[in-house]
Image: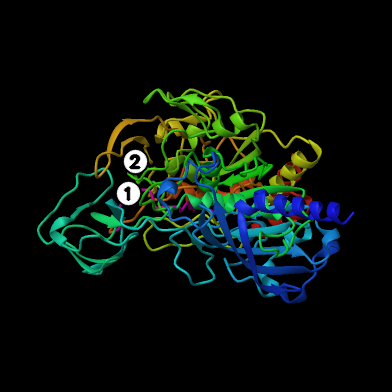
Amino acid sequence: MGQLRRAIVLIAAAIIFLSPSAAKVVKFEILKVESPAFEGRTFGAVGTYDRILARATIAVTPDDIHNKVIVDIERAPRNAQGQVEAMTDVEILRPTVAANGNRTLFYEVLNRGSKLGFALFNDVPAVTNDLVKATDAGNGFLMNRGFTVVWSGWQGDIVPGGGRMTFLPPTVAGVTGLAREDFIFDHSDNPASGTLSYPAADLDPSHVKISVREREADTRTMPAGLAVTFESPTKISVKRPDGFDAGAIYEFIYTAKDPKVMGLGFAATRDVVSFLRNEAADASGTANPVAGRIDRAIGFGLSQSGRYLHDYLYLGFNADEAGRTVFEGLMPHISGGKKTFTNYRFSQPGRSPYEHADMLYPGADFPFTYPVLTDNVTGKSDGFLARCLAAGNCPKIIKTDSELEFYQQRASLVTTDTRGDPITMPDNIRLFLLSNLQHYSLAQDKSQMVKVCANPTNPLNAGPPVRALLIAMGEWINKGTLPPDSRYPSRANETLVPPSADKVGFPQIPGFSYPSRIAQPTLLKSEDMPPSKGAAYPVFVPKTDADGRDIAGVHLPTLEAPAATHTGWNLRKAGFGEGELCDNNGTMIPFAATKEERLKNNDPRLSMAERYPGEGDRAAAIAKATQQLVRDRLVLEEDAGLFIARSN
């Protein structure tokens, strides 16, 4: 009997040694536990929450099929077991009473090291990374529903501080190569300082290239007065020439050294979530703090982190090294048809190609959408779903975009092929345009002027429909209840049109210009330095009505009874690249109060008095529209009152 017991112990030890966790999260160090969190605040029937701060060390096998896609993984230093290690910050919010949780792990991909999801789901009035005070939980939506909320670092170039969460990938020492930086200073300091993404291998200014151009499409110039000096291996000083405004683009090409294995960030997300879902303890015996609590996982990403989810899925990371599915559902928000500049040598994950900035960085090229298509420019066949289809682990996907993504982020290529013809989404995909929203607004935002933009911003907030769609995602995963049908513009019904004011149908508002250009993706010839442009891909934008309101998409109730024209886009003002698209900002242009006022201003849009002649007419229209969205499962009943309150 003693020999049998010893044999069982030896077999168990061998299983632990060979288990998937031994090759993944090898160390899960809990640094701090706050119980209860949020100053003891309770969240409905769920009760209080605990906050856990931790640090995880992952160790991946370079030759494993799930990891071989990581750029430079074969060059990275290895531990004694031949694995490549990296370390990431982890934060967990869990119900104090395990039985009160909904058994769903909600993973928010960090945006440049910061937590933005609470501003969207929980309506917090300002983005905060240190979730300590009761007010930091906002309306408590995620906690009231019993989610276990998790964040972990993935971006290997985040500068610590401000509560930002970090990821520490290995460096490939001794490797050099050309790297490039685009700087748009949006100020007039001269000289101007710029921080490099990687240390320079050669500090001789005569061995670098620097140029300036007013707009992205302009020819690079090297005028008299333009010069650069190194202040350190990672910092330069740029002497700015006359004749260029604050929004000019300065391109700097240099020989960099010591790239980081940035693609390991995808493995870090995969392995942390898989560990929390599946393992009782790490390789050294430290207990998993949510062991036995999780049956399913939903991944959410906003803007940069939504593009990260595209890459995560596309590169095949939704299966861990044991082949287990990591996320049953993914929710990329305001990510358009782009990916990230992450899994590359000398990558810069913070870059995102926009009409006036970063257009020549890789990571936002074909494929642009989920189904596997053939690119008519290159002849390549691919799609975001290609690898998960082959592995049989494709998640359910609910994607939401603002109007801006059609102007800045290739969103029309999500729903067309590369010839511009409409395509059909697979059954596991739902697409939603949040009509006329700008890229991102807090729930409490007001329209305001910002430094570089010509027009006041757009305060419409995406929180209510995104909250409703998260609930729909949960029901889709848990019960098989189909979510609402997609609401996204299409070439098939002519709600997606060429980007010109006449085709769009945008009103001719005095003193307000429609964009003369939008972000135009092209084939990039990355073998050139700087990269050169090849053939262009067709892009389209949503068609509007006479008020400038998108015909397709989810109309917030305040759009069904509007008081202004809202756009997802804005324009740069004089002195800052005048006329170019103004980054992530939208616009709000109020209607005239009376018919007389609008006629005096030659405004074609009906006035408020003409639209709502009776007292309470607008409020009644908003209430009616809200209840229809509740019936359509695109707004929760608990959020219905928000629209009336915000319309007053």
Q: Earlier in the sequence, mark 2 or mark 1?
A: 2
Q: Position of residue 99 (x, y in %)?
A: 86, 59
Residue 548 shows in this picture: yes
16 or 48, nearer to the observer = 16
Q: Position of residue 239 (x, y in %)?
A: 18, 65
Tell me: residue 516, above or below residue 423: below
Residue 493 is left or right of residue 623, and the answer is left
294 or 615, nearer to the observer = 294
| Residue located 83% across and 66% down the image | 47
Disc 2 and disc 1: Cα gap in Å? 7 Å
Residue 100 is left or right of residue 39, and the answer is right
What kind of residue is marked 1? Gly
The residue pinned by badge 2 equals 516
What kind of residue is marked 2? Ser
| Residue located 58% across and 25% down the image | 424
The residue positioned farthest toward the right in the image shown: 1
Quadrant in the picture for the N terminus: bottom right
Region in magenta: 576-593
Residue 241 is left or right of residue 499, and the answer is left
Q: Are marks 2 and 1 in contact (CB under 8 Å)?
A: yes
Tell me: residue 512, above or below residue 90: above
560 or 410, nearer to the observer = 410
Q: Position of residue 168 (x, y in %)?
A: 48, 62
Tell me: residue 417, above or below residue 124: above
The residue pinned by badge 1 equals 579
Secondary structure of the magenta portion, mostly? loop
Residue 349 is left or right of residue 10, and the answer is left
| Residue located 49% across and 47% down the image | 568
| Residue located 54% across and 65% down the image | 165
In what element is the residue under mark 1?
Answer: loop
Quadrant in the picture for the C terminus: bottom right
In what element is the residue under mark 2?
Answer: loop
